[in-house]
Amino acid sequence: MKPLLEVKNITMKFGSLVANENVSFAIHDNEIVSLIGPNGAGKTTLFNCITGFYRPLGGRVAYRGRDITGMACYEICKLGITRTFQIVKTLNEMTVEENVMTGAFLHTRSRKEAAAITEEILDLTALVRKKDIPGANLTIADRKRVEIARALATKPRILMLDECMAGLNRTEIKDVMNLCLRLKEQGLSLLIVEHIMEAIMPISDNVVVLNAGKKITEGMPQDVVNNEEVIKAYLGDRYHAKSKKS
Amino acid sequence: MVKNKKTLIILTAVLALLPLITQTKAVLNAFILLLIFATLGEAWNLITGFAGQTSFGHAAFFGIGAYTSAVIFYRCGVTPWLGMILGGIIASVIAAVMSYPCFRLKGHYFAIATLAVAEIIKQVFVSWSYVEGATGISIPIIHRSSGFGRRLFYLQFSDKLPWVYICLALFTAVIFLSSYLENSKMGYYLKAIRESHEVAEAIGINPTNYKLYAMIISAFISALCGSIYAQYILYIDPFMMFSLDISMKIVLLTVLGGIGNIYGPIIGAAIFIPLSEFTRIKLGGSGTGIDLMIYGLLIVLITCFRPKGVIGIAEKAAEKFRGKKTGGGGSIEAAS
């Protein structure tokens, strides 16, 4: 099957710092792919390269066979790839409803249509009760939810979530997990950057592990967690040796 | 939105009836200036209040509008109505050409750039002999016995009442346009751009294009105001039309009334213009500047205590009133 999104040999440097080196992976239709790795592994940079916020120094990104490397991010969004931000960027002076509505206007001029999309998304993300609260007054959990809702309102084929669960409590994480699964049911593909393993592993179809800018492995969740390289990357050599003994 | 329309219609009706109370020349004069500046404030609000791009150079568009209609009337005898439209178009084109590169700048730097652009345009007009340079243009007066039709055609009236209604018509059109834009795709997009450039781009908005649209509309409206102002006072020169004073008046009265709110400019103008006109009349030559002192104090107080302007105070009061009615339910909701 032809992949929906193909990332090939992406390389990105900031000065002499290599943030991504020859990273390749693919996202297929109706698939949840997660991107994990220790802090500073280059996950967000990769995100930015895919969504057009950065222009990668080398490699290419193809969406449905079309080269989108270096396209402006608003154009990439129009094609069907929408992202959220790790540091949530709620539109503070707008209400939750208006936040989502702004996203909903992407494929329509009509206020009525946008309102219909907004209502549907608010319902899906369980924000209906909070729709009149200004962005500035939201809790972090709700902000993250709004972030996802606003992205969803643009009706993407691929939704890219950048650490949308960090800082949430168990119930809230559970909610986001369920939402991800529901979106997959609806036919979306998701690319998720996340640190919380117990949340990401059960829902992922494919896990890509980055360390120091390089992809160290990729595969089914259960295989990845037992991979030596991955354990080493997360725990360091010393602890790795211990875990081997036990 | 329906509720909004109702408020707007009531507002317009009240404004239309105001001149019937008194026909004193000074009062009507203040009323005309008030409407012109409220319209300018609405125009400025589009680019700064909604899109968040602070412009300190709106006098440039105002002046271009004034000069276009005045020059083609003075040189070729063409009706100012046509000049007004032409002025709007020229101002829009200049706005687009000037702001396209300036939109690469963010925040204060954009504001400084607009200030510079306005100053450049002023200098061009000062040294341009075809438009009489620094001497300015006295708009030719049509014959005293002209009938109303001819007066309307050449936009010169012997009394002030027609001016009130022309300005009111323009203001009404502009505030309805603002209200429409605010609730349309463009309004949402402009506000998203104001709040976060990155979010805007991430949800498929091309920020440069939308800022450009807002600037073009804003410049067009400002130019219309300029044409009307020129015909109203019948004399223009570059120092008056392109002055920083006018740019600042537009900025400050909108900030005073409430930036980013369609009622802000009219409220601000309703406070500021009468204040400046009547202190000027009452205190005469010795009192020039008193209005600015009072006004300066108001601005300082507003920006310190109520950054959302007078409209912010009104909203807060309304909230309190509503809160009392529902037993404070509203505030609990907001807190949760």
Image (cartoon, rainbow, N blue to C red):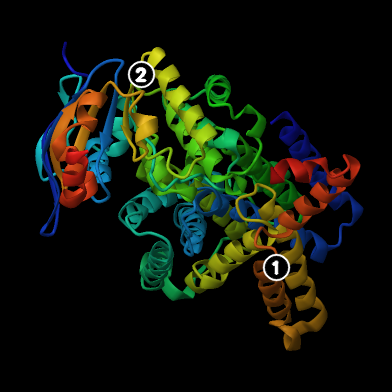
Asked whether A162 or A104 is in front, the reply is A162
View extreme (bottom): residue: B286
Q: Please state the chain letter of the residue tagged with numbered disc 1 in the rendered image.
A: B
Q: Please state the chain letter of the residue tagged with numbered disc 2 in the rendered image.
A: A
Question: What residue is shown with label 2?
Answer: A188
Q: Is residue B267 visible?
A: yes
**Label 2–label 1 contact, CB within 8 A:** no
Residue at image position (58%, 22%) is: A123
User: What amino acid does circle 2 point to?
Assistant: Leu
For residue B129, above or below residue A134: below
Q: Position of residue B330 (x, y in %)?
A: 78, 42
Give the class, few, some or many, for how many residues have Cα within 10 Å of label 2's Cα (few <14, many ≥20).
many
How far is mark 2 from mark 1, CA to CA? 48 Å
Asked whether B147 or B167 is in front, the reply is B167
Residue B199 disc label: none
Residue B305 disc label: 1
Task: Decide if residue B300 is on the left or right side of residue A12.
Answer: right
Residue at image position (50%, 49%) is: B218
Q: Position of residue B262 (x, y in %)?
A: 65, 47
Task: Decide if residue A72 is on the left or right side of residue B274.
Answer: left
Looking at the rendered structure, the secondary structure element under dot 2 is: loop
Residue at image position (41%, 41%) is: B200
Q: How many marks?
A: 2
Q: Position of residue B291 (x, y in %)?
A: 72, 77
Task: Decide if residue B22 is on the left or right side of residue B138.
Answer: right
Looking at the rendered structure, the secondary structure element under dot 1 is: helix
